Amino acid sequence: MSLDKVDRFRAGVAVLAGAGLIGLVGIMAWQSSDPTSSAPTHFNGDSVGRNNGESIEAYIARCRNTRIDAADSFALVTFTQPLGAREAAETVGSAGSGGAGVGRVSAVVPYENAPIALPEPVAGATREDVFRRWIGDAPIAGLIVYTGGSAKEKIRSDQRVMCVESLPADAAWGKFGIKPVL
């Protein structure tokens, strides 16, 4: 191979690499402006929380007009303002231990953060301990609970609670959307 052929080969590789880089940057710019990648998620099925564009007042009115069934089901409990772990645990209590007697707290909704699934407290631990272990001292905007209608009504009457939005009894954990309220 003569020197000319080597130089032409290198120039060709450089041109191809440059064209590939320009193409990659172009694809990335095109994808970043795609509304499907930056728009809010629309759920196809059950969901709790404020709808896109819904005011907080309209959401509260919708929650108050929602019937709470006696059957056990999931519900989003939203506080009037973010609470600490102790206060959030007090609002739901635990089955047979004061508070509302909630059967299960499935997730905590930290203020301005995504929901975090929670385990149930083990022997010797409280819901407050579980909240602190999973989110530390982060303020809690709401909880996802699984409990019956009487416990949901009791939670709804707590002055620290803005609203309780209940899902249908056939809603399954992990199969419904959770949209932030606060």
Image (cartoon, rainbow, N blue to C red):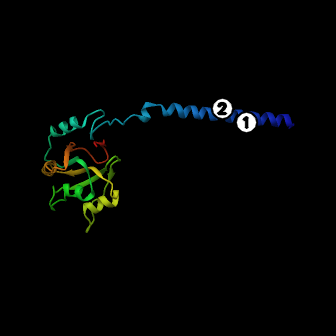
Residue 114 in the image, given as x and y percentages of width and height? 35, 47
Tell me the number on the disc at residue 19: 2
Q: Which mark is residue 138?
A: none
Secondary structure type for disc 1: helix
Q: Furthest-right residue in view?
A: 2
Q: Which residue is drawn at 34% across and 56% down?
A: 135
Image check: 54 left or right of 11?
left
Q: For numbered disc 2, what is the local secondary structure?
A: helix
| Front residue of this view, candidates 17 and 87 | 87
Is 9 rendered above or below residue 96? above
**Residue 84 lies in what quarter of the image?**
bottom left
Residue 146, relative to residue 124: is it above or below? above
Please name the amino acid that badge 1 sits on. Answer: Val
Tell me the residue at 39%/34% (across/down): 39
Q: Residue 13: which disc?
A: 1
Residue 74, horizontal then vertical, whole percent: 23, 47
